[in-house]
Image (cartoon, rainbow, N blue to C red):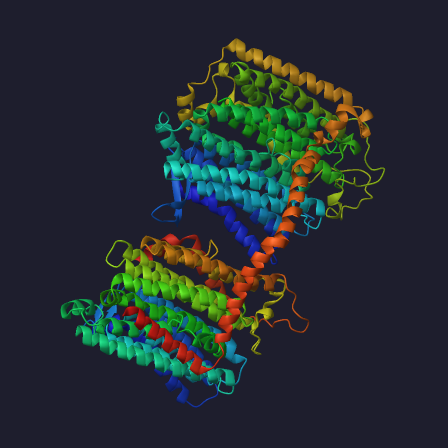
Amino acid sequence: MEGLIQTIVLAPFVSVALLFLLRRQLPKSAAAVIGCSAVLVPFLCTVAAFFQFDGTPVTATLTQWMTGSVLNVPFAFRLDQLSLTWTLVVTGIGFLIHVYSVGYMHEDPSFTRFFTYLNLFVGSMLCLVLGDSMVLLFLGWEGVGLCSYLLIGFWFDEEENAKAGQKAFVVNRIGDLGFLVAMVLVFKQFGTLNIADVNAMAAAQAATLDPTLVTWIALALFVGCCGKSAQLPLYTWLPDAMAGPTPVSALIHAATMVTAGIYLVARMSIFFAMSPTASTVVAVVGCATAFFAATIGLRQRDIKKVLAYSTVSQLGYMFLALGIGAYTAGVFHVITHAFFKALLFLGAGSVIHALHHEQDAMRMGGLKKYLPITHKTFLIGSLALAGIAPFAGFFSKDKILGAALYSHGLPQLLGVFGLITALLTAFYTFRLYALVFQGEERFGHGTHGHADHGAHGGHGGGHGHDHAKPHESPLTMTFPLMVLAVLAVLGGALSLPHFAHSDLLGKFLEPIFAPAYAVLGAPHEHTVAQEVGAMLVSLVLAIGGAWFGFSKFSEGPGKQAEHSTKGLPFLLENKWFVDEIYNVLVVGPMRALSHLAGFFDRLVVDGLVNGVAGMVRSAGGWIRMMQNGALHTYALLFILGAAYLAIVLL
Amino acid sequence: MTPNDLALVGPILLPALAALLVILVDLLPGSQRSSGSFLLAVLGAAVSLGYTIHALMHDRVGLAFYGTMKIDRMALLITLFVHASAMLSLLLSKVYLDRRSDVEQPEYHAFVLTAACGMAMLAGANDLVNVFLGIELLSIPLYLLVAMRKHQSRSVEAGFKYLLLGAFASAFMLFGAALLFGASGKTMLTAIPSGIARIGNDTPLAAFGATMLLVGLLFKVAAVPFHMWTPDVYEGAPTPITAFMATATKAATFAVLLRLAPVLGASLGEERAADLLGGIAVLTMFVGNLGALTQLNLKRLLAYSSISHAGYLLVGLAALVRSYGSSAEAEAASSIVYYLGAYTAMSLGAFAVAVLIDGGKDREAVSDLAGLGKRNPLLAAAMTVFALALAGVPPTAGFFAKYYVFLSAVDAGLIAVAVLGVIASVIGLYYYLRILLTMYVDEAKPGHEAVVSRDALVGAVSLAAVAFVLLLGIVPKGFVEAMALAH
């Protein structure tokens, strides 16, 4: 078992080293095999570990790391129900996306570099998920962040992408600050950073812990989560991050990395359970993000931007679930979302690939004829995202909404907003589906390469742009689509509604959330009537929204082909002008401040610093002057030094 | 003398035997003398290294020659560093000497082995006489090696300076040893403290003796103000010899300083000795780091860097003297040994890069590194690791080395020394980063691109050093445990 855990963590890093050292020698095929098996091996090991797992967490220590009287951090990895679940998702979906990337990136000159980064990402993500201390978790947290910037800016010769990478970097720093503060607070209170110990101590001292401190820890953690999981107000980097290659969007910015925030809250759920304030903040921020991002999704033209905003929105649902204490439902939605969102992104990638890097949905249409497999799998993904039974998304979203609606007070209100969001989600999902696959063909004429996202054209080169007819992607790309489609259909079976008496995931995760529920009180059991009622309402809304979206756009974009110039559509299309508002409110003043500071700098600080630097340098020069090469100077100093020592002694 | 004694001092005898063989082979007629002596010398160093490792693994420790030699784990570990350094320097010498015709190779190789023998002896010496023997045995070949390029005035001048000042330092040491003997009636290091206590400490005899002995040893490790020779000698000497001196001499001399810690405490008073050493440490760290700031020559820069590292090591020594007899003692001692191991690897690595870019034309300016990041990314990456390690950036060995040394200083109550040490290392960051900037940002002047020699052996050496530096940094725990047994 411990060997398995070690293999899981080490395999991606071994591959990174191999790919880096042999990047010149390896042919693309070998790099692809190494890169993919570096994720397949951990996946198989995780499956093996799953079957060997008997309910007691296992810790595998690779080696000691920091040791000292104060802080002891070994390289230790802990497999329990929660990390096992996440590891299965990360390695399983990660493997499919690796396979897909072989096809998607096959013409890219930096093929090997791409797989190096991708493997580095998987390794860091596993470190984040499996690390048994907050230090390792943070190491992984920073690692996945680093890979994310590297991959967003993968085509770094394009300014747009480099800027998006920078934005992600800056926004995530704000989040990381929160994480660090939480870490310091936890260490100060508990004297250790081992997560299991911290949780156990917090649960044991639940009655005596200072509630303000707990709230601060939880809120600081949540700030970190907002950055990584793109919640209000730190979500703006995620849509921009879609500048990276599409498999990256699928793996990092939809299925795995962005769920790290959910993981962290679930992992430290005891702190949130102990602090109603923090939980409320989580729920409100989550719900608001879900709703807000869904409204923006209504009017986006770029196929990847729609999916990006829907990711932000779905992440909001997950936080809503965690905030109202429906922890299992939140984790469940992470899993199903990973299935169908990875599927949708990869499908979008397949479309973009077929259309030579066209991303504007207004210039698509009628693709069901040319891309049959992509079409069918994308439809399944859309049904799942829209929350239509019996697809995976229905069950998980229904669990969250049900938990919210049948509680009291604020969560109930949030549940109503959740329902409205579900309607919006179904609408924009089928709007996108209809625009891309139905109606008449709108591609192939007019200027090629929209100003915003013609960016990758140069890299997809070699396709031959004169091909009029798009064609289905190769098997390496469609195979992952089909597997993910099956998962998106069947994923709901992991946690069926209560009346079906088959909540596999809930049972499995029970030990993880038991301490939190010990504080919160056992989750409310809904009656069959309540459950069915909630299901019906959400299903009606979803189908209504989907039908409306589909019928309105199945003939083409209509008026939406033109950019709107006023009213709500104008606001939505421009994402509520949040980026611009940030520019005015935050970036502008910062610039002004930095100009002012620059003035101050030049006048005062520079003077001071130059003074100090001058001092340091002249001290350097002075030492050099003493070093005049004359032997007698050296001997004299020697004697003086010895004499000084003698004087000191007497 | 028993067979067991001989087995214990094997790591000392083997290089001496190899040196004799090299000289004998030199007497044979034939044209393959230089490569023959090279192979023989490397083989000798490798066998010595292997023997030392074997002794370490099987715990072949004990007293030899009536207790005048103490071969314990600390001695073996430091001997290991010495022999590894000797072997790597010999490999570097091959590249360096093959491009020059002004050096007699067989003597060169024999001298390196003789010096290694002296250093190994120093590491195990437990008697004032043996300490002095070891010091001389390592110094005399080094004087010669520094001046080995006898048609280069720089080299000869360096050798001459080193000889004169070295003789000066030896005189101090010998006086100090005599005074210590007078104050304690003993020459065995472990017996001197009780000897001083028995005779009584009412005369400054012991204090003077210990200080003079200390001055001689501080000269060898290039501590301020006895460091003046270092930049000139390091610059003038053949680069592989500079690498050897900077690492192995330092390691061997610190072995003696570790053993002298109780003597220093007994003769000077623990607090006063720690303050004295702490003061010298601070001075050394600052002079080393400030001096390096303005250097344009890579070897001189590394010389100042080597001075600053002597300072960090002295912080550990001050902590050891201060905490002698307490629970923190072992931690302080092992932090020094760990530091020596890390320093040996990263410094040798940096010098190896210097040898590789020198192109047989003594290209030693920092600016000769320009554009290395583009032309030879692997070598540049290796140099990056070494520079970051020397600067003490995690997760390299250099970081943990400094961390443990400063930690032991804090534990011993030498907080000011630790704080000043951190400040000094921040100053040091600047010139190590300059190396990186030069490699990656600067463009080489046309026609001035360094000719990087592609030598498989040296490549393997640098790679091993990189691996060691990173391994020591990523998993320091195991190494610290190994070192902890050292004392």
Quarter of the rendering occupied by the N terminus of chain A: top left
With A49 as the anchor, is A469 left or right in this view?
Answer: right
User: Looking at this view, is B298 or A79 the one in front?
Assistant: B298
Is residue A41 among the parts visible in the rendering? no
Against B213, residue A539 (above or below) is above
Q: Which quadrant would residue B340 be assigned to in this image?
A: bottom left
Find residue A425 and report its horizontal and vertical position in percent: 66, 23
Q: Residue at x 71, y 35 (%)?
A: A580
A129 horizontally vs A422: left or right: left
- For residue A239, side relative to residue B68 (left or right): right
Which image quadrant: the C terminus of chain A?
A: bottom left
Residue at the image point whose x is 43% and y is 21% from the top: A520
Say if residue B27 shows up in the picture: yes
B76 relative to B26, above or below: above
Query: Which residue is situated farthest in the top direction here?
Result: A529
Across and down, in percent, residue A164 comes to 66, 42
Q: In terms of image quadrants, where is residue A289?
A: top right
Q: Choose between A601 and A192: the one closer to the eye.
A: A601
- Asked whether B419 or B189 is in front, the reply is B419
Q: Give the answer, above or below, for where B114 lies relative to A437.
A: below
